């Protein structure tokens, strides 16, 4: 009976070449050179240790200065939320079709949406677009509110 001995394959040329190249890559100077050259070629800014979370912290410091400028902007609201409050029962099919095209829902989902009024239609919509939607829905017989 012959005993099984573990077989070790001889190193190939590829493995030998990889061993030769892995040594220099491990050294920090070559790694640093590679990183700096890639940053310069790709126009990547230097980030502090910690990545994006650490970079966001210094940006929070000038916030009190911006609060004074943001106060007048808060009075003039530019983005609104549209809510379907109610609708005329005779205009229900037209409203369902409009909701379907506006929100990209299926016909069944649009019907459920309209029947569950009052319900929020859209968020963060610019004022001019809100006014167009409110006017269109009003002509169909729906009551839509900008909040």
Image (spheres, helix red, strand yellow):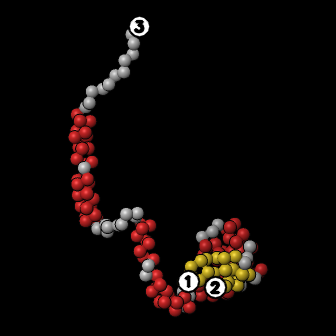
| The C terminus - image quarter | bottom right
* Drawn side of residue 41 relative to residue 86, left or right: left
Describe the element under mark 2 as helix, strand or loop. Answer: strand
Instruction: Please report the residue visible at 43 percent of the width from the left and 81 percent of the height from the top.
Output: 62
Question: What residue is disc 3 on?
Answer: 1
Q: Earlier in the sequence, mark 2 or mark 3?
A: 3
Q: Specify few, some or many for label 3: CA neighbours under 10 Å numbering under 14, 14-19, or 20 or more.
A: few
Q: Earlier in the sequence, mark 1 or mark 2?
A: 1
Q: Quadrant of residue 37?
A: bottom left
Does 61 sit above or below residue 135? above
Residue 50 lies, in percent from the top left, at 40, 63
Q: Quadrant of residue 76?
A: bottom right
Residue 104 seen in render: yes
Q: Nearer the viewer, residue 84 or 50?
A: 50
Residue 45 lies, in percent from the top left, at 31, 68
Instruction: Please report the residue visible at 29 percent of the width from the left and 68 percent of the height from the top.
Output: 43
Q: Specify few, some or many for label 1: CA neighbours under 10 Å numbering under 14, 14-19, or 20 or more.
A: some
Q: From mark 2 to mark 3, how far is it between C-alphas?
A: 89 Å
Describe the element under mark 1 as helix, strand or loop. Answer: strand
| The N terminus - image quarter | top left
Q: Which mark is residue 79?
A: 1
Describe the element under mark 3 as helix, strand or loop. Answer: loop
Q: Nearer the viewer, mark 3 or mark 1?
A: 3
Q: From mark 3 to mark 1, how far is it between C-alphas?
A: 85 Å
Does 19 sit above or below residue 25? above
Q: From mark 1 to mark 2, how far is it between C-alphas?
A: 9 Å
Q: Earlier in the sequence, mark 3 or mark 1?
A: 3
* Drawn side of residue 108 relative to residue 34, left or right: right
Residue 63 lies, in percent from the top left, at 46, 82
Question: What residue is disc 2 on?
Answer: 146
* Drawn side of residue 20 relative to residue 107, left or right: left
């Amino acid at each position: 009976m012959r005993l099984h001995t573990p077989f070790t394959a001889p190193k190939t040329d590829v493995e030998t070449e990889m061993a030769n190249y892995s040594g220099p890559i491990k050294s920090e100077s070559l790694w640093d050179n590679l990183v700096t050259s890639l940053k310069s070629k790709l126009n990547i800014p230097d980030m502090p240790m910690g990545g994006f979370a650490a970079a966001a912290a210094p940006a929070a410091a000038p916030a009190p200065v911006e609060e004074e400028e943001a106060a007048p902007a808060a009075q003039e609201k530019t983005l609104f939320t549209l809510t379907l409050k109610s609708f005329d029962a005779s205009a229900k099919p037209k409203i369902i079709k409009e909701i379907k095209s506006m929100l990209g829902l299926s016909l069944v989902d649009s019907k459920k949406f309209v029947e569950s009024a009052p319900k929020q239609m859209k968020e963060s919509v610019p004022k001019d677009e809100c006014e167009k939607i409110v006017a269109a829905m009003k002509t169909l017989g729906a009551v839509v509110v900008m909040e």
